[in-house]
Image: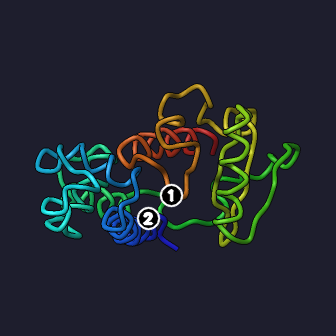
Amino acid sequence: MNIFHAHYHYLKESASILLKQCLDGNNDAVERFHRLAPFAGLSKENNNLLETLQLKDAFSLLALESGYASWNELKSALDHAAETSSLAEISDQFYPKGFTTYWNIWFAKYSQAKKVLVEALSTKKKMFLLPFKNQFFLVEEHFVDSIGIPHTLPEWKTIGNDWVHPNHVKAWLVLNEKYEKAAANRK
């Protein structure tokens, strides 16, 4: 699985869901669209403006929230990472040999891991979601520190401590580069 291509498809699905939520009058979704200039006055009551929303607007919003000026720029960044990053094809690179002494929780499904991560973060517990082959695992700060991507890096908070489907692509790609360097130095 190429994690960058998988995240691109995840974002496409997220855009569809976001648009549907907005059209259904979900306050949080409507509020998010205020970041786009044409929709600054968007509200559930403003049907004329609400009816002009299209999927391309949801793509634009997700690109902006991910640190990019456009959806095409976001897609280009993910495509570039998919082609050039040593971390693109997920195997065991986030669980290097010799790091089995750390406490972690394993999951077969991303949705289960994400739910536990959200619960942990809501109680101020520092957890990090990482991929391993076709599985997912949650670790504490000591683990990410030891593999070379310190929990104190501000990008972790920006991506929501989720390496698989991060909140912010640009910050994720910065962390990706830092981890590639750390992994290369470990060899």
Mark 2, residue position = 7
Name the colour scheme.
rainbow
The three-letter amino acid code for the residue at tag 2 is His
Residue 165 circle label = 1
The one nearer the camera, 136 or 120, is 120
Describe residue 24's horizontal placement relative to residue 149 as left or right. Answer: left
Count of numbered tags: 2
**In the rendered structure, are the residues bearing label 1 and label 2 in contact, judged by CB atoms less than 8 Å apart?**
yes
Residue 33 circle label = none
State whether residue 1 is above or below residue 63: below
In x, y percent, where is residue 43? 25, 51
State whether residue 136 is above or below residue 168: below
In x, y percent, where is residue 153? 53, 28
Q: Residue furthest front?
A: 45
Residue 150 sits in which quadrant? top right
The three-letter amino acid code for the residue at tag 1 is His
